[in-house]
Amino acid sequence: MNDFAIVTDSSCDLTAEMANKLELTVLPLSFNLMEKEYHNYLDGRELTFKDFYSHIRSGEDCTTSAVNVEAFVSAMEPILQSGRDVLCIAFSSGLSNTCNAAQMACEELSAKYPQRKAYAVDTLCASLGEGLLIYHAVQEKRRGKSIDEVRGWLEDNRLHLCHWFTVEDLNHLKRGGRISAATALIGTMLNIKPVLHVDDAGHLINVGKARGRRASLTALVDHMEETAIDPASQVVFISHGDSQEDADFVASQVKSRMGVKTVYTNYVGPVIGAHSGPGTIALFFLGTHR
């Protein structure tokens, strides 16, 4: 029986339209800005993505919160009561407590509904990396795979979901403790841009640097060229921190250099954007390794 629902969280950074087409139930993380709490809905209904980045550019501080256990239970219990199983595909445990909350909710619901299945999978992914893994999971489901088979596919393939990204302003990484104040100062003076990825433990890792913005964008495509599995047949995702023009440049490079035909772009949502800042560009694809 292919009778299960896929639940996820808003850190997947999919567009609301795509999430709807993929038939997802999406729970919002939240963020605090200007002493007000907002929910990170995919359609930006409480605060548009452009407005969010305008506030961040003006120097407003922003803090973020995970989805809690009660929210997952409230979303998943009606699905189980309807006779369907639940597969929750969650934001990396290396970056958020959201996945832990999802796992606790599944344990609670499995005990209450022993005849049903409720699984939570740690994607070890972030932003549209999480979104792309979910996209592929839905394709597996639509091919008729069972909940156990899709769960297995996710666990077997999550470390092939490659994340390569760069940021415009090093000070956001400094505030998040990702780089030192000295590194941020020197890097800013010399126009050094970091090249980062998400490692096998789902953590954000600084792995290189480039001199200037265009070089850092090209470096993302270079890394894809090195490890991508049959790139011409892949669907590729790119997320951006209110930098559509740079996202379009990376998309054009991916298409011209590797023959990729389908590229989707969208904003880095507020929960992740609060830490990476405006100007973030991230490239996601399937590769031999992260």
Image (cartoon, rainbow, N blue to C red):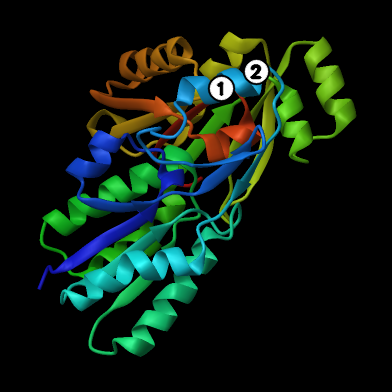
User: In the picture provided, is 189 more to the left or to the right than 1?
Assistant: right
Indicate the quadrant where residue 233 lies.
Answer: top left
Q: Secondary structure at mark 1?
A: helix
Check whether the beta carbons of the residues at disc 2 and disc 1 lie within 8 A of each other: yes
User: In the picture provided, is 137 more to the left or to the right than 1?
Assistant: right
Q: Position of residue 237 (x, y in %)?
A: 36, 32
Asked if 110 appears above or below 46 in the picture, the reply is below
Amino acid at dot 2: Arg
Amino acid at dot 1: Tyr
Q: How many C-alpha atoms fall within 10 Å of the one at disc 2: few (<14), some, or many (≥20)?
A: some
Q: Position of residue 71 (x, y in %)?
A: 43, 63
- Along the viewing direction, whichever of 146 and 25 lies nearer the viewer: 25
Check the image and name the residue furthest to the front. Answer: 36
Q: Which of the labelled discs sits on residue 57, or is there none?
A: 2
- Along the viewing direction, whichever of 134 and 289 lies nearer the viewer: 134
Residue labelled with disc 1: 53
- Residue at 30% x, 62% y is 153
- Residue at 13% x, 69% y is 3
Q: Can residue 20 be seen at all in this image of the molecule?
A: yes
- Residue at 48% x, 34% y is 269
- Residue at 38% x, 27% y is 266
Q: How many C-alpha atoms fall within 10 Å of the one at disc 1: few (<14), some, or many (≥20)?
A: many
Asked if 54 appears above or below 94 in the picture, the reply is above
